[in-house]
Image (spheres, rainbow, N blue to C red):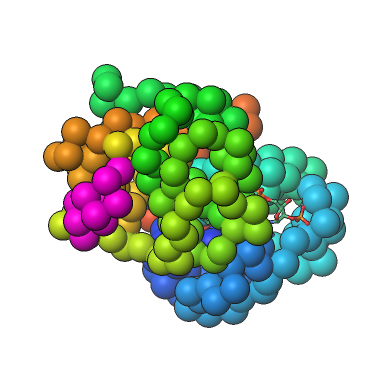
Amino acid sequence: MRILLLGGTTEARALAERLSGHEVISSLAGRVREPVLPEGEVRVGGFGGAAGLAAWLRAERIDALVDATHPFASTITANAHAAAREVGVRHLVLRRPGFPLRPEYDVVPDAHAAASAIPAGARVFLTVGRQQVSAFVHADAWFLVRAIDAPTVLPPRHVMLLERGPFQMDDEVELMQRHRINLLVTKNSGGDATSPKLNAARALGVDVVMIDRPPLPEGVEAVDGVEAVLARLGQSG
Ligand code: NAP
């Protein structure tokens, strides 16, 4: 099969490796300055919306489109759904499970709601990705901001940490203690690479504001891991 694999995640890289018996083209948006590249052929950059992606699928004679993008990358996921329908190619979404939710978490629908949920004077560990930091510029709080690349807009009182996971629980505990963090604000991205911050928050009694995932487009076929993608693609021959 000729497969377009929409990536930018750990799972997409694992999948690219496991699909080596097929002709796989991995696609990255080009957001990260020095991305970790998957095995095999890679293209970088947007397609030009759903219509652009549909045209690309036709031109490249793609048989199956696997969307293994980040759970918060909702625009490309909607576009992939629409384009696959239009062209009539097999379409599958790999969506990793979310973080286990605890009753004490303050679950909010988006970054602006998360910013509103921050009490005045809080010392916040902010791990929402570079693109969402701008929602927090007016919050009356101090921020430890962690992202892979530096955000263009930052809250006035902050320390910036440019780091890429996986992270370890001991290091997360030490980091939060050193900066006297009393609130963790994060997206419900899921994944082992970034979950230790939640265990550290629990161990230290640090409150958690969790931004909920955007919903998947209605009617998409979604599975939660690499093995399940392989099984479904195997079934479709
Ligand atoms: P998004 O808001 O859903 O997409 C915005 C636009 O970026 C899309 O319309 C598309 O442009 C382009 N795009 C996104 N993913 C692409 C891909 N894999 N290949 C080609 N073009 C892509 O996406 P995002 O949240 O900015 O995420 C961008 C990339 O970073 C994704 O690959 C995602 O897996 C990865 N990522 C995102 C997050 C996050 O928190 N959002 C975290 C980690 C990794 P056109 O309309 O021109 O096609």
Q: Residue at x 28, y 60 (%)?
A: 167
Quadrant where the N terminus sits is: bottom right
Q: Residue at x 62, y 27 (%)?
A: 218
Residue 234 counted in the magenta span: no
Name the image quarter holding residue 5: bottom right
Does residue 109 appear in this view?
Answer: no
Counting from the top left corner in percent of width and height, residue 95 is at: 46, 44
Does residue 89 appear in this view?
Answer: yes
Q: Quadrant of ligand 1?
A: bottom right
Count of numbered badges drawn on the protein: 0
Q: Nearer the viewer, residue 38 or 204?
A: 204
Classified by dominant secondary structure, the portion drawn in magenta counts as helix
Counting from the top left corner in percent of width and height, residue 157 is at: 50, 49
Q: Nearer the viewer, residue 149 or 25?
A: 149
Q: Residue at x 32, y 25 (%)?
A: 105
In the image, residue 166 above or below residue 212: below
Q: Which residues are magenta?
A: 171-181
Counting from the top left corner in percent of width and height, residue 142 is at: 44, 43
In the image, residue 114 above or below residue 68: above
In the image, residue 149 above or below residue 108: below
